[in-house]
Image: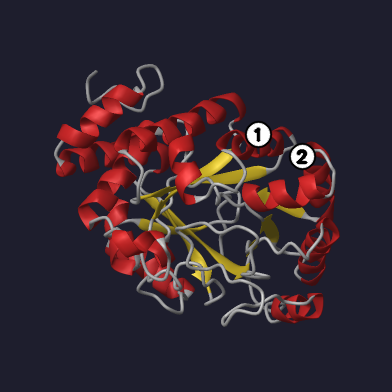
Amino acid sequence: MSKQEIGQGVNRLSVKEAIEMWHNMPLAELGAMAQKLKHQKSGTEVYYNRNIHIEPTNICVFRCKFCSYRRAEGQDGAWSYSMDEIKELAARYVQQPITEVHIVGGVDPKRGFEFYEELISTAQNILPQVAIKAYTAVELHYIITRAELSIREGLQRLQRAGMRAIAGGGAEIFASRVRNEICPDKCSAKEWLEIHQTAHQLGITTNSTMLYGHIETIEERFDHLNRLRELQDQTGGFSAFIPLKFRTANNELGESISETSIAEDMRMVALSRLFLDNFEHIKAYWPMFGRATTELALAFGADDIDGTIDDTTKIYSLAGAEDTKPKLSVEQCRTLITNAGYTPVERDTFYNKITQ
């Protein structure tokens, strides 16, 4: 396959070809190829948005070995916001020009489906101008099946409450070998994919992720990407893919593993762009990579950095990311993108451009 053909749909990369490129192609060459494909999709534009997170709890029924965020009830550092506290948090942004509220957290077994439903409607009522992106497939599977609803029924109720998009977390690595080791009690890869497929059928856009850099093999990484690509072929419902670097601080898995190098991170970004030819957007999530590495990732095919966040997420700061209080102003987002040689474009949740 020629370099000119890669990512053009007719002669897309096979899993075997992608693995071969991972092992044997120089990083600079991979970056140039990924850049070319990025330019075909979005020219010189790189996206950011004005967003906040609401993380209602870090109490979680699951005990994932990679997680630095989870706490048991009563443990130091645990929190579980009441609805009044969530209202107060959302009300801080009534006069702010944010366009997205991203809601994810632990799976607290004391909270039923109605709480999650009310959380969405509460946030939407206080902030009617924003799009609510709510919950991972792991959270959704637990709260919906526990309520004895079908996945479709549960998603439809949350959609009526105001949920317009679903976060991409919880995918980790789809390979059963890995899931059985690092998150055996979570929903399966099949269940994760089925939730996103059903969401797409209902007109709910979703993100997708992969947690890389722990015990998975390169073959398992591309098996994961291939399953995402196959579902995107069927539905077209994924708006972005986000490669998530495993951070080693404050979790069981990190006790025996070193973090991936920046060179490996860039190889992952570039091959995500090249392999996922049916995804429009590859996100370099700046609270996870850090600002400097995010800027570098824009030279390897990423075209989105996420958003302002305003120090409202603790997931990666607890895992050892360099920004312990993740927050960027609009000007800082724009400067990061401009410094990398690109044109900053503000977007909404659905990648519609926002002009001021």
| Vertical side of 344 occupied by 187: above or below | above
**Element marked by disc 2:** helix
Q: Is residue 219 above or below residue 153?
A: above
Residue closest to the eye, 331 or 192: 192
Q: Quadrant of the C terminus?
A: bottom right
Q: Does the image show residue 13?
A: no
For residue 88, side relative to residue 96 (left or right): right
256 sits to left or right of 75: left
Point 28% across, 66% down: residue: 292
Q: Judge left or right: residue 187 versus residue 83.
A: left
Closer to the camera in the image, 325 or 193: 193
Structural crowding at the residue carrying mark 1, measured as other residues with C-alpha within 10 Å and reported as few (<14), some (14–19) or many (≥20) = some
Q: How many marks?
A: 2
**Which circle marks residue 194 in the picture?**
1
N-terminal label among 1 and 2 = 2
The residue indicated by pointer 2 is 151
